[in-house]
Amino acid sequence: MDDNRNAHVILPILYDSRVSNRSYFGFYTTDGYSFILAVVFLGPQSPVIWSANPDNPVSNGAILNFTREGDLLRDSDRTMIWSTATVNKSVANMGLVSGNLVLFDQNNSSVWQSFDHPTDTLVMGQSLCRGMNLSAKPTNTKWLSSKVYLSAEWNGLRYSFEPAAYTQLFQAETRLQLRPTQTTLVSNSTASSCYAFVNGSLGFPDKIFSLPSASSLQFMRLESDGHLRLYEMIEPSRARMLFDVLSMAMDFCDYPLACGDYGVCNNGQCSCPSFSHFRFQNERLPGAGCIPLSNISCNHAQGHQLVALSDVSYFSYSLFLSLAISGSSQTVCMQGCLLDCSCRVVLFQNYGPGGDDGGYCLLLSEQKLILFAEDSTDRFSVFVKIQGNYSYKKRMIIIVSSTVAGLPLTWILISAIIWKKCKKDQEQLLDSIPGTPKRFSFHELRVATNHFSVKLGSGGFGSVFEGKIGNETIAVKRLEGVEQGMEEFLAKVKTIGRIHHFNLVRLVGFCADRSHKLLVYDYMPNGSLYKWIFDTSPSFTLSWKTRRNIIIAIARGLSYLHEECMEKIAHLDIKPQNILLDEKFNAKLSDFGLSKMINRDQSKVMTRMRGTRGYLAPEWLGSKITEKADIYSFGIVMIEIICGRQNLDESQPEHDVHLISLLQQKARSGQLSDLVDSRSNDMRFHVEEVMETMKLAMWCLQVDSSRRPLMSTVAKVLEGEMSIEPTIDCTFVPNFASSNPDVEGSTSSYIPSDSHLSGPR
């Protein structure tokens, strides 16, 4: 590749002149120094419609090798950057067809095409199929490691912003329906697994979005602000924006990046919640967000105050419900924020007008979406944390800054030497720990997952991708936001790697490569339990025998973690998404790799809250937990398996939204059989056994954690070796409204880090 300093240059390798708008494939640069391997329309000033290495540009001297194994891009230092992963497919030819880069075998059959691996753009005639997604990086520096996705799923197109857990699902349009974690356009027809971009629509044959008719070649791009925009080519080599595709389903204020941090969105306009405490980050760009007038200092936490904001609510009510914890009082919610220095905002909503039964509490840190909507309905109580005035602190900052500025260069050099030594010691640590699972390089896992192209799920500290090493399919979890040093991470990998049980997903390897931390698990072909118990399709209805076997398997896996490991391991996020099923529907627990380990002589552990709304034990509000928190969550999962519905289901009538509250009512009135999954006639034939299992779940749901059974006891009851405790308290929903628990000094958060579809699959 020749050196070139002219901006917007395509150094062509292939071109296709058969279409009215010609496309080129080659090395593309906008600065003459860094290059991406890309397909562009027309010429130098034209849009990039696909690239092999969008996040990892190469320098001058990079090489593209075309071999029988396919394409292989190496940087100037010969580091492999990208590959088509077409080993043993006898690639014989490469072509460019209407913007689609295709590799052919000797029979002229396609073995790989770029249309199957989109980046941020779809071209007319291209389809987005299940497992594919468009992705875009936000330009906001806070979210540099985050992405906006538009993904194809079996039931529609999902729009998401990770890792902030914001998601919406679009299907063929009939009616708009709000759900706890998404906004869905619900269709009565069976959704296709591929959604085609054709003239006039996206989603053919089941039209999801209508589009303006094309007068020339069109393409749509998911852009850094989260908008999906439709463009049309104009001669010569220019494109004009025609349409904001998602505008039919999303208002400006629905976008998670609409007004930036602390911004208040109203009718497409951005403002600050209170100019007494905030100012625009950039007066000329209100959409860039607002910043507090006082910076929060963890060293002076005694000066932290919570100031009420009026006439605002959270920008997404469905996201609020998915992240919030229920059962808290407003006082406890506010105390939780004051005890957690990372907390910046308190959002609280009462269950009812009186506010006597508690409500939903959500604490927002800088790592969450802090965005408000104008709201005069008083649905929310909103408080922001501010720092009190400390003139002494300001003087100290000036003194320390002056001292640091005067440090001699020698100290800087010493710091650099120490940093290099620590880095070297850290690398040596990787190979010095015996018993550690197989170590992979980041490059190996990037190739194995085809550049992390097939996403299985997200949440639980990261996203999970499907991969292949040899003939073995694997699940690769790319960790994000894990606050662990390398030594602690490796020690935990070593411990988890030694855990082998039939009902636990096996950790087969890991990656600790610079800033990259990844875990490699066995792949579970039947995915998570979630779809098998909550999907309304008859094909997903499980028999009672299968459901019971799954319950027994979960109990055995948890019993092993709690009672048979050298250290107790509290999972802390038991839910259907973290229960995976192999090809024979054997259940295996996942996502315990970052669980909390408890010493045998430690009865309780103080920890940052981890888990998912709807599955949290009552003791979380006091931040004192044991492995008994898992038993409560397991009880909820048992009830969900038996009833075939979620514990918190906003689609139900208001009085039936909370399954555990409904269970409490039915238990007291002797009508438990009313809750059994009506879709399964098989469960009606085994009603006595189902009722006994439901009573066991109720034993696990005791508000007093000391009254819950051990997991080994649960397993023995299920296996017929023990009996259920005869006196079970039928109060499963604690009333926090009248209590004000003593919150001990701790920096723990009272709100879980949301775990949406977490765990390897």
Image (tube, rainbow, N blue to C red):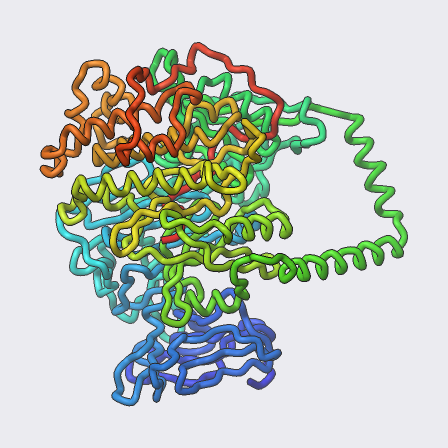
Residue 432 vertical placement versus 339 (above, below): below
Decide if residue 658 is in sight here: no
Q: Position of residue 579 (x, y in %)?
A: 34, 45
Whether residue 119 sits left or right of residue 426 in the image: it is left
Whether residue 256 sits left or right of residue 80 in the image: it is left
Q: Nearer the viewer, residue 441 or 193?
A: 441
Instruction: Give the residue furthest to the front.
Output: 721
Q: Position of residue 587 (x, y in %)?
A: 31, 47
Residue 464 vertical placement versus 483 (above, below): below
Q: Residue at x 36, y 40 (%)?
A: 556
Q: Position of residue 487 (x, y in %)?
A: 64, 51
Quadrant, the N terminus: bottom right
Decide if residue 401 is in sight here: yes
Q: Residue at x 41, y 51 (%)?
A: 226
Which image quarter: residue 61?
A: bottom right
Q: Residue at x 26, y 24 (%)?
A: 695
Q: Position of residue 572 (x, y in %)?
A: 45, 36
Q: Nearer the viewer, residue 297 or 13?
A: 297
Looking at the rendered structure, the number of numbered marks drawn on it comes to 0
Which image quarter: residue 387?
A: top right
Q: Nearer the viewer, residue 549 or 399?
A: 549
